[in-house]
Structures are given as structure tokens and as C-alpha cells.
Image (cartoon, coloured by chain):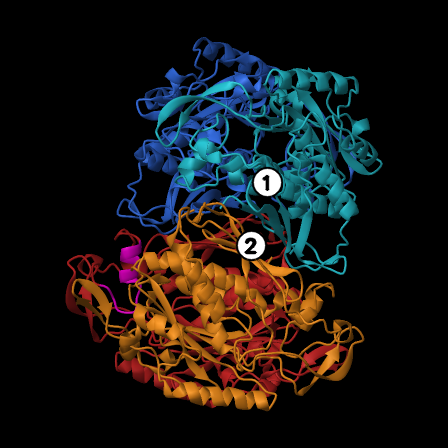
Chain colours: A blue, B cyan, C orange, D red
Amino acid sequence: MGSTWGKNIKLSLFGESHGVGIGITIDGLPAGVKLDLDLIKFELQRRATGKNELTTARKEADTFEILSGYFNDYTTGAPLSILIRNRDQQSRDYNKIKDIARPAHADYTGYKRYDGYNDYRGGGHFSGRLTAPIVFAGAIAKQILRDKNIHIGTHIKSIKDLEDRDFCEEDLNKENFKKLSEKQLPFLDENLEDLSRKKILAAKNEQDSLGGIIECSIIGIEPGIGNPFFNSIESQLSGLMYSIPAVKGVEFGAGFKITDLFGSEANDDIYIDNDKVITQTNNNGGILGGITNGMPINFRVAIKPTPSISRPQKTIDMKNNTETEFKIIGRHDPCIVPRALVVVEAMAAIGILDFLVVS
Amino acid sequence: MGSTWGKNIKLSLFGESHGVGIGITIDGLPAGVKLDLDLIKFELQRRATGKNELTTARKEADTFEILSGYFNDYTTGAPLSILIRNRDQQSRDYNKIKDIARPAHADYTGYKRYDGYNDYRGGGHFSGRLTAPIVFAGAIAKQILRDKNIHIGTHIKSIKDLEDRDFCEEDLNKENFKKLSEKQLPFLDENLEDLSRKKILAAKNEQDSLGGIIECSIIGIEPGIGNPFFNSIESQLSGLMYSIPAVKGVEFGAGFKITDLFGSEANDDIYIDNDKVITQTNNNGGILGGITNGMPINFRVAIKPTPSISRPQKTIDMKNNTETEFKIIGRHDPCIVPRALVVVEAMAAIGILDFLVVS
Amino acid sequence: MGSTWGKNIKLSLFGESHGVGIGITIDGLPAGVKLDLDLIKFELQRRATGKNELTTARKEADTFEILSGYFNDYTTGAPLSILIRNRDQQSRDYNKIKDIARPAHADYTGYKRYDGYNDYRGGGHFSGRLTAPIVFAGAIAKQILRDKNIHIGTHIKSIKDLEDRDFCEEDLNKENFKKLSEKQLPFLDENLEDLSRKKILAAKNEQDSLGGIIECSIIGIEPGIGNPFFNSIESQLSGLMYSIPAVKGVEFGAGFKITDLFGSEANDDIYIDNDKVITQTNNNGGILGGITNGMPINFRVAIKPTPSISRPQKTIDMKNNTETEFKIIGRHDPCIVPRALVVVEAMAAIGILDFLVVS
Amino acid sequence: MGSTWGKNIKLSLFGESHGVGIGITIDGLPAGVKLDLDLIKFELQRRATGKNELTTARKEADTFEILSGYFNDYTTGAPLSILIRNRDQQSRDYNKIKDIARPAHADYTGYKRYDGYNDYRGGGHFSGRLTAPIVFAGAIAKQILRDKNIHIGTHIKSIKDLEDRDFCEEDLNKENFKKLSEKQLPFLDENLEDLSRKKILAAKNEQDSLGGIIECSIIGIEPGIGNPFFNSIESQLSGLMYSIPAVKGVEFGAGFKITDLFGSEANDDIYIDNDKVITQTNNNGGILGGITNGMPINFRVAIKPTPSISRPQKTIDMKNNTETEFKIIGRHDPCIVPRALVVVEAMAAIGILDFLVVS
């Protein structure tokens, strides 16, 4: 049930890490959109694996086949469905480990939820691999938003204790967003690129893993979009962010740090600049009462360290209900943050587009 | 559109701060629940105003009239609807200030969203007053969860820089939750009660306001509840938390701090204790892959400083599109955190109940 | 759960026949609509009881109190909620008959659905009285549609075997719809008014009841509205029609009789008339592939004879699980058709508006 | 938007008649169902084309590939997705006819709805071919219902004026449903098989087409399932029936004919038979107040004559907005009724299962 989403743009996600493949059906897209296939491929490549020492060695081309909803190079208005076949699943004997609950993975919770019938190979439907179809959908959403002059950008705010500065006004333009999207380790402070690479590789070397924080900004959105209460911009976006495996925190504007401020500091004073209503500060992240005020929508997402590590861990055999020790063997990312940036952008684009299209 | 919610338990919220009243319709409640009216009144009183120097002087008894769905002291299974009439609205001349956008309030965003037709008096439908019916719904949800041995508790994690310790295992039991719920300023470290009172009153004296962080824990929930992706426990709960006015951050388990840990530290090792599967740490806040693992669901919610302050603030006249300066006159809370605790619990109860009932 | 509806226009219905009252919350209405209170009252009076010998003697003024969403004579965009208090409930001793399942009523099914906790007095939440708030919502929807030049009309197609002719092109204009709406027994063939009155009164005299068929037409809708498959115009409208108590059949265009035609007769040939695309016949009732073609949307709704009759009927005592015989005492309509016309129009208006507004 | 459906069982339908293929994703199926692939294939074959002179000559094996949600022969609880590739599309030059609106087809309405971007080949996403994935989903739903002792059967109630008798009590058992499902032309009166075959072939010979009525019965369902108002059994089932292309009427129990009865005749008296509550007649089709009473759910569905006929028809060129005459060339069914039976059963099974599972 959790794999279907949406009011105007409806998503239906399917697939498993080691099954036939993965895919998505997107219902509610406007007709007549000429898909920017280069953008889609570029976005998919941003989350692709196997491309360097920072990512898992599993090589998936993520070649998608459009199954429907696309005709003569335009969306038709009918559901757009794609299939990405799995290629580089390793044929290890999963039978040996299928009853072992990998700590911080969904093995135990999936086992309980689905009475042991879930596909356990590589996390099955819980796999981070399922974010590839989401990036596909996000690329289309980004393209449609781009035509409305709305742009979405991210940078790495931190990898463990290595911390970048926050987005400031000068950073928030489409040219800079593009530049950041082309980097392997997009920090605003470029010195952090090399430092973070070394930090990640050191963790990898120690058979350990790292997490980090992603900052995202959505610019160009008109004031007056969203709703009070249950369908607030924050409710919609946080719900989508928490759909990304490994996310443990979502904050908007000044976020948790707003609690360190007095009201007189936290309140964003309002001005008029060239006939446009603006605020000097943006502690509310562009949203008041669940509705946009025209300022950039800023939020941060906490990504936990990759749960897959090769060190021995204490856990249980779920079938026999006994304690055991276990070492994950196989390919995994020492730090998922660089590949998660485009997923955060995709979810943001989908969430915003759902408020803007009518279907 | 944002005032309707739910899959199994459906909420429909209505009302304005200075209109006839506020209320809620709850569709999907099980039939045959004998309402614990004392619990409902107790919960409503926890968020009530006018009871002490820490809250706004507006006195609302929040007397509710049950309009439907309740017969011979039991829920009927039909929609349960209540009306709370407004009583202590002040009859100030709102005409003078109706075009002034109060900073950090939804005045400007509501004006744009509803083309200036929204009820501007006291924030209208955006008012925090709308959380009273949510507390009503939450009290019923808590009662039903209590019968399933699920309990929800909160404490103040911080008021500005005054910081309490985190919940630890010993804190997580229904007796302690009850004790905390009876306090005006529920800190685990009781020394903070007096310190925080002084801090809030000092801010009030300075015509300023404070924010803070609420920590919430849900105990007694079985493993295997929830869904991957879009309907994860975190997606559902964060969506509800962000429906509470003034919330700017939501994090689960170790939250943003999980990014400071190595994977080997962050992963919660799994053990068996008296035939029950447990984890030693709970950095994942009781949720993996969007599904409960049977550990307490822990999360924190950041509440921004009350936007209403009596200091002069820079803002605009929305009608004339001109800059102006403005001082909010009237009654307001110097810190909303103590009254928000029960709202957080209510939303948590509603969110969890929706996963557990069938309707 | 069944009392909440909608995608863009969300309805939440509440109340019982003999409780405090009945009402509805409408979320998603556009802001800035100056309500036509005369239209609302006119529509409510069309389904009102106690006004003549053809309806039940229960006298309900159906005076509504607007609780929210309405300010300075305009809708605000926030949920519009109303309460209609019950006044003329008879204080009969329901205890005597509460376990008797009235045939063709929802007594037994409600008893099973809600484990005997449902409010049994006068049908409780199942009562036809709940259609009053729907007529209220429908009147607003009609007003908004009227401004888009869309009009909805009905006539009585039949009362038992007394059959009117079908709508023809000349009947389909707003002036005629208005004229029909002002009649107590709106037949196209005016001779049937008196005949049907006599027929209904004869049935009443025999302590019996009658049903009939309502024909409805929606004119002025643009081509291209609706969706294929699950959200087709027919799916949406039939779902709403079957929400009206006592409806047992819904057919569009030629309906069941289309099966008597050859394809060459049934297919509606397409022409251009003054630059407008039209069909000569309208066997498809203005809908193809779930989407409007610009022709009038025509459909018919079968209303069963009022189940409440004063004759003795065989039934059961639900508590003791024993057979019994039973005579319904009290006030009831000998034929519900004349009062159901405005309910059908209301549901049609709501269903169409949901496709046309964005919220 | 119209291709996504459901509350507990969620369907996402995709594909076009002449594109890559068609398919469906089913989210919310219980885990641990061992699929009865023989049943699925049997059901697909019931709606298959090309098997005899009564159906279109297009030969589609409807071979499905399960893409996800199925592991080691059991459903996993994750979305079950299938793809059926198109094989026998004819490579006619659609360019010639793409602007011609075929009467009684969705060509014109789709053109308006999707601004001319819809895939026009063979009706695109509007094609009856899309019912194949629905039959797949229905077969799984039927299997799960079968394990709850709920069975669904259909017969042809009429082909044009050739009319079968109604289902009677003796017909309503799983053995008879099976027997009917194995027939090409399942009438209760077996004499009608040959007569109807001749009638259909005669129409085919005249380049014309026929419609008819399908009667469906759902047996074995407990009382107390369903909801009042918007989510009544009738609302849910009629919404699904009207999602089937070509359906123009849906009636429950006695349907439109109930309006010919007095209340004293129409009311179904209630009895107790072997401790089971039953009604003598079933004019209400097993549903009162939107909720099952334990009697068979009976309904009838009107299927219009196949719109594709080879006779010349008056229509328009949509691009040039000119009138024209047109002859449909190609393969089509002279009467869709025999192939629609299994689609009606599939929709019924899906609709009922959605009320019974929890996800």
C-alpha cells in the first residue's frame, strides 16, 4: 500500500533489487510534454552505481523502457510507465542468509510485516534501488517545473562532522544548481570535496560507513501555493522525503535551530523589492501556514550512515529466534549521501508539481 | 483541501479563531467505544489558554458539543462530529489591521492563496486554536490505543537553549507519561521547570517569545506495522506533525545527530530478551523501512518561537503593497511549547491509530 | 468511512435522524463565492417534509447555521461547515422496536456492521434526512456551475407504471429547468401531475408506497472533461447516485435500452453545427470513454418504493434471532420520488464541480 | 488520473492498444498467496480474442510477465506488477485516419481531453484491450475471495432482444458458476446459445453489431460489509462497472423494475433459516444502506453494441473541423458481451476484496 502516492500526480512504484526489475507508473502527467531524455539520463546517472570508488561496485545501466503514455515523442496524458530491468544481481546463495536480520535494514520489519514472504534478496522492495524510478519521475517533474521557471538544487551540507556552509542568496540560481548537479561531491565550499572523499574512503577502508545532511532549495515558486494543516507544503514534502530509505530527519528553513532564536530574531520581516514581496531572512523556509510566500523553499534532510557494513554485527536469526553474529559480504556504498542528492531533488519536484498541475 | 485527512480514520477539520466556532468530524472510528470524557477534558485542558501567566489571557472553556456519532455513551461507527463554540473573541476593530501581514504568520500566504477572502481575524482558519479539535480527536485515539496497550508520552526537550536530557528506557512507561502529562512544564530534569518558567516570563517581559523542542515516544506498538515508501510510519507521522502550526523540524530516533555517527555506531544491534526481539540502542527510532520493529517510536519536533510579539516589526500592507511598521496588540503566548505537547501526542495517536484500525 | 468523499471538493457528512442534528463540511470550495442564500433555501425547501399530503408529516424547517468558511458574505476557501439541528423528532419509545429489523431498511445491515451500537432511532445515520446537507452542498455547487453556464435539471420519468416522455432537446434549457424545479410533481407531460398525485394518495390510503424513475440532464459542459476508467464521469456520478438511499439503478444515455439497438442505430453520428461539434442522437448520454463530448449528460435513476409502510410485515428480532411480524407506525412518505429530484441534482452538481475546480 | 484506483487494493493500469504493451500494478495484496496461475490463464482466455468467429481476428496470446511482487511462488506483499506485450498490432497507416472521430468511440473526447496528444492507434489507452490486466487482477481477487468462500458468477441476460431468465436460487452455487464460465455463450436457458450465435453472426454479416445485458451474482459474503453513502457497496461496484468501456447501465437487485412494484411487494421480508438470516425475495440485491445483508449481491450491467462497425458513418475530421463519412476497416467483435462477462466478474471481485482486506 505504501508504494502508491498522490493526488494529481499519482505514482505507483514496483520492483525488487534482485527480481526482474523495477519501475514506476506515473498517472496524471499533462499531455503534450516532449520528454527531455537527456535530462532523464543525466539524473539517473547522478544516482548510478559502479561509477567510482565512492559507490557500490554493482553496475546497473538503469536503462529504462517506456511502456506506455509516450507517443511520437510526447506524453499522451495516459499513464506513463517504465521498466528498468535488473542486470548485475550477484547470484550469491541468499538461502544461507535469508533468515539473518541485517541491523538497521528492513529485514526484520519486512519479515514481520509480510509474514516472511517478502523477497529478502538485497532488501527486495525495500532496496534503495527503488529510488531509480523515482529519479525518473523526478526528472520529468523537474522538466515541467523548469518550464514554469521553478528550479531545484541541492548541496551536501555535511558528511559526518565535515560541514559545509548553508545556501545563501547568491547560491540560489539555476546556473549554480546545474553546476552543483554535475559534481560528484557538491559542496559550496569546494575545499570540502577532497576532504570528504578522503573521509569516505577512510571509512570504507575501516569497513565502516558515513551519513550526512543534504540541503535542498526550490526557487521560483509563486506565493499562495499549498494548504493549511494536513496538506501543507511541509507535510507533503516531508512525507515524500521520509519515503526515501535512510532518511531520519527533515527540517524547513532554520529548522531545529529556530528554537535557539527569540521570536524577534526568528520572525522574517517583510519588504517590497521591485514590486515583489520578500523577506530579509528566510527562517520559515518559504512556507507559512503550509503555503508558499514566494521565498525559496529551503529544507534539510538527514541521511543515516549506510547500514551495510562488513564488520561483524550482533543480530538474530529470525526463523529460529536465536542471537547470532553476522558480517555483511558484498558490494555497498560507504556513504549514500552523494547518490541521494538527486533523489531528494526528485521527491521535491514531484511534491511541488502535484500542487501545480491539475488532472 | 488541506483540512481533510486520512485513510481509515478520516478527519475533517473546520472553524476559525473568531468565527462561530471550531470543530472536527471523525469518520471511521470503531463502533462501541465508551468515550472516556474525563480523558478528553483532561487533554483539552492541557492545551487550554488563560490558565496561567505562561499562556495567552484569552479564556476559552473549549466546551464541546457532540453533534453525532455518539449514542447511549458509545460511539456508533457513524461520523463523530463536535462543535466548540468560540466565546472570548475580542471585538477589536480588525478592519484597521486586516491588510497588515504579521511576520511569520500566514496572513500574507493566506491572502495570496484565497485572493483576500480568508477570514483574517486572529488568523482565521490558520489559527492555533484549530488544534483544540485535533486534541479532541487525539484523546479518543489515545483511549483506543491504550486499550491495545499502546501509550504516548512527551516531554519538553528544550526551551530555547535550556536543554533537557533525552528520554531513556526508564522514562518510557505509562505511569511516567501520566506524570509528565500532569505537569505544566514537563521536563525530565525537574530543575528545569523553574528555570524555564523564568526564561519564558523574561521573554514575555521583553515583549518577545521563545520556541523549543518536544520529544515524543510511542510505546507498546507491535513490530510489523507500517509500509515502505510513501506510507511509511515516518511519512505519516511527519505529515501530521507538519500540520501543526509552528512546527519547523521533525526527526526520528537519533535524527540529525545520526549523521555524526559511523555506521558501526548508528546500526542498532539486535538481541532477544525474554523471547522479545529488541535493539540495544534505538537510533532508528523504532522504525526500519517505514515499518515498526517493536522498539519505542521516538521523535522530536521543533516549535518555532510564537510569531506574535508586541515589538514593532517591519512588514507590508498587502492591499496597498507598501512597506510599514507594525506592533501586534493583543493576547498571545510567550512560548507555545507547553501547550503544544498534547497536540503532538494527539497527532501521533491519530497517525498510529490509522494504521491499526480497519473501517 | 463512507461519509467522506472527494478529490477536489471534499465532503464530510455527519448526523442522525433523531440526534442533535445533521450537517456537512465542504473542503475545497473556491474562495470568493458570494453564496446565493435564496437558492440554498429554495433547494432545501424542494426536499422539505411536512409541506403537503404527499410527504411525511414530520416538520423540519432545515434551518442551517453556517459554522465556518463564510465571512463577510463570501466563501473564504477554508472548510464551509453547516449544522441543521433536528427539531421535530417524535419522542416515541424506540426501546420497544429497536431490535426489530424493518424490511428494506438498513436496520439489520447497520446492526451487523456496527455490532449493534448504531443509533437505531429513525434509521440514525442511514436516514434519508442526511440528504438535506447534501442538498445544501449541491446548491452551492449548482451556483458555481451556473456561473460557468452549466445547468442541471430533472423531471419525474415515472411513478410506478405512470410514465412520462424522455427529455428532448427543447426541454434542455435553464428556463425550463427552473420551471420544473418549482413544481411539486414535475412531469414534462403536465397531465401526469394530477394522475400521479391520485396514484400516490391511493397508495398512501392503502398503507402502501410507490417508487419511480428520475431523469436528469446536465447541460453546458465543455467537451474533454473526465477520465478513462476508474474516474470516468459515469463512475463518479453513479458512485454519488448510489450514495442516495433508495437508489437501485443508474443508467446513462439510452441506458439499458441501448442493448435493444444495432450498433448502426446506437452509434451517435457526429456533425458540426455552427462550429460546434454535436451528435444527432445522444445514446451515449454525453460521455464517451468516461469523458464529456459536449452533449448533455443524461442519466436516469431508479428510486425504490419507500420501505416504510404501515402494513404488517414479516421480519426478525435481531437480538433474540426470532421471527416476528411488525407494523411500522409513524410518519413517512408514500413516495419519495418528488423529494429526491433535488437530491439527484445536488449529487450531479457536486460530482461535476469536483472535475472542474482545482483546490 | 483515471487509471489509478483503490483504498486497500490499489490498482494502477497502464498501456495502449498498439504501443509496447499493457499492464497493471496491484498494491495492497496480502503476502503469502500462492497464485493459481491456471485460474489466471483461464480467466484471460475467457476474454481472449481470435479464438472463434464471434470475436475479432486479432490474436493476442496475452502472455503476462510478472515483474515484481511474486517470489518463490507466493505474493510478497509488495506491489505485484505485470506486463503483457502487444504482438498482433496491424501496421496499417493510422496517419490517414488519425483525425477521424469514430462515432461512439472516445476519439473525439480523448482528442479534446489530451489536446490531440493521445495515442489514437486502436483507441490507445481507451481500448478495451486494457481490460486484460483487469482480468489478471480480478483472477487474483477471485482466488482470494474463493478462499473466503465467496464466489462470483455471470450469465448473459440478453443479446439484443434475445432474453434469458434471471438467476434464481438454484443457479447460485460455485459449481454452476464454473460451468457457466466454461461456456462461450453462457445462458441459463441453453436453447439461447445457438440462437444468439446465429443472431451475432447475422449482425456481423450485415456489418453491424449487437449489445446485451450481463447479470452477475456474488455469493457467500457475510452481512455487515460496506458503508453508508459514498462508499456503499453499490457506489464501489457501480464505479468499477462504469470503468469498463461500453457499459451504459448498472442496476442492483430488481433494479429499474423495482419502480413497478408497490412497497409491500418490493420490501424483502426477513426470515430465519437454519439460524441464518435470509430474505424471501432479493429485490434489494443483497444490499441495504450500502451494506451487505448476507443475501447474494445481484446486479446487471448493460453493454452497448460494439461501436466499431464497417458501415459508412457520418462523423468529423477533428483537425479540420469538417464533416465527413467514414468506414471502419479492420478487425472487431460483432458483440462484446461474451468477452465482457469475465471483466464484470473481475471488477466485482476487486471491488469486494477491497472491502475485505486490510493493507
Position above or below: C31 against D282: above
Residue drawn at x 46%, y 33% as measured from the top left: B107
Q: Is D217 placed left or right of C328 in the picture? A: left
- Which of the pair D297/D142 is nearer the observer? D297
**In the figure, A332 relative to B349: above or below?**
above
Q: Quadrant of residue D297?
A: bottom right
Residue indicated by mark 2: D7
Indicate whether D3 appears above or below D57. above
Q: Nearer the viewer, residue C153 or B268?
A: C153
* Chain under numbered label 2: D
Question: Which mark is in front, 2 or 1?
Answer: 1
Q: Relative to residue C60, is residue C170 drawn left or right?
A: left
Q: Is residue D103 magenta?
A: yes
Residue C246's quadrant in the figure? bottom right
Q: What residue sits right under mark 1 in the picture?
A: B130
C35 and C238: which one is in front?
Answer: C35
Question: What is the spatial separation of the Cα atoms under label 2 and label 1, in whole angstroms?
Answer: 28 Å
Q: Which segment is the magenta one?
A: D101-113
Residue drawn at x 65%, y 47% is B355
Query: Can residue B200 be seen at all in this image of the molecule?
Result: yes
Question: Which element type, helix, strand or loop, lies under badge 2?
Answer: loop
